[in-house]
Image (cartoon, helix red, strand yellow):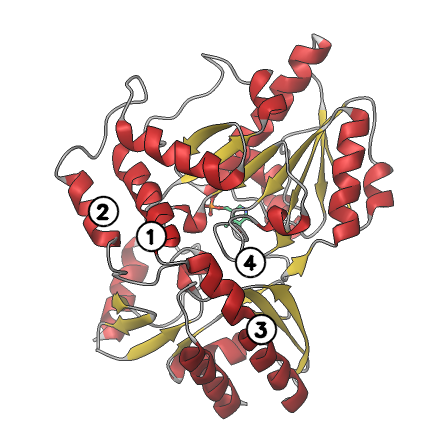
Amino acid sequence: MMKEQISRSEEVILHTYNRFPVVLDHGEGVWLYDTEGKKYLDFAAGIAVNALGYHYPGYDEGLKAQIDKLTHISNLYYTMPMIQAGEKLLKASGMNRVFFTNSGAEAVEGALKCAKKYAYKRDGHAGHEIIAMRHSFHGRTIGALSVTGNAHYQEPFEPLMGGVRFADFNDLESVRAQVTEKTCAVICETIQGEGGIYPASMEFLKGLRALCDEKDMLLILDEIQCGMGRTGSWFAWQDFGVMPDIMTCAKALGCGVPVGAFVLNERAAAASLEPGDHGTTYGGNPLACAAVSTVFDLFEKDGILDHVKETTPYLEKTLDDLVKKYDCFTARRGMGFMQGLVVKGRPVGEIVSHALAEGLLVISAGTDVLRLVPPLVTGREEIDFMAEILGRIL
Ligand SMILES: *Cc1c(COP(=O)(O)O)cnc(C)c1O
């Protein structure tokens, strides 16, 4: 049955993904089921999106209540879901203004425009530059791709947006070396995700903050993957005590409904985008914002951040034990429920495929990292089960 479904898919859907040979049908808790009824433990969470797993109590109800009222109305009007979602996002971040988008890439686009406009207003002219990191990932649209430090993703689509200079992540001097009088912003992930799960060092992030302040550049932190509770704080930068001028969010922001945001501190909000500068038809529509609002409420009500904080040592110890036990794992990297195991001597894809066959969904990151980004509601028993399956296939 799945075989036939997969060949139907390949007849209609543009082949831009080498998908795993499974057709997923429904989920419950932290488990997924394919169309043949086989069960999988989910340590991928739709790539760090489904932080609450599936059918989390109260989530569907929040969405359904909004569907019964209004799913879309233009940004030409005010709606209560957007007001409420915005208030909650600002409360969690301590930042100043929000713009809701439909995706992560679109949030990055907005952040870049915001930085350019900030410098344009200050200097009275355009032509500014942005510093981005090698091995970063910020999305697939042309602007976001332009700051994604991966030649393989960029090359066919050149020329991209100009005025981007690349530096090395966690190397402050390499960033400093790229600063010119034209630089308006530095963009970086607080924890590099796609690049292979590399957390920023405290020294680097604090150094970036100081450098941006010194040169009046905006610090853009991409929290699309590492934010929304994944590290046990609302946002990973809070673990470092380094507030960005602009942060981008998406992925777990709606826990399954497509929604993103860029969030500005006071400095950026006071002197950047103005009426007419930016817009979106769908962005922040009532359904998406009801999801955001529901997610914040459930995280608070059920102490999701505390659960992540409490469970992280157990997850880390379990993964460290795997590194000790199996030669093919050489190291663990990560924070909270965003972890990577460095794989040596065999393709990561092979482990991912074997895990799938054994009923465990995991994904890769970079060229040699097994990425574990489970739902934030995952418990110890499921962590044990993950380790058991990985042990079995190794
Ligand atoms: C996934 C991701 C993006 C892109 O988000 P989309 O919703 O796929 O456009 C950008 N930045 C980071 C860090 C991501 O992990």
Amino acid at circle 1 = Leu
Along the polypeptide, which appears first: circle 3 or circle 1?
Answer: 1
- Quadrant of the rendered image containing residue 144: top right
- Mark 4 CB lies closer than 8 A to ligand 1: no
Q: Crowdedness of circle 1 by 10 Å Cα count: few (<14), some, many (20+)?
A: some
Q: Are marks 2 and 1 in contact (CB under 8 Å)?
A: yes
Residue at mark 2 to residue at mark 1: CA–CA distance: 10 Å
Residue picked out by circle 4: 231
Which one is in front, 130 or 145? 130
Residue at mark 4 to residue at mark 1: CA–CA distance: 17 Å
Amino acid at circle 3 = Pro
Along the polypeptide, which appears first: circle 2 or circle 3?
Answer: 2
Along the polypeptide, which appears first: circle 4 or circle 3?
Answer: 4
Q: Residue at x 28, y 40 (%)?
A: 290
Residue at mark 3 to residue at mark 1: CA–CA distance: 23 Å
Quadrant containing the N terminus in the rendered view: bottom left
Residue picked out by circle 2: 62
Along the polypeptide, which appears first: circle 4 or circle 2?
Answer: 2
Q: Secondary structure at mark 4?
A: loop
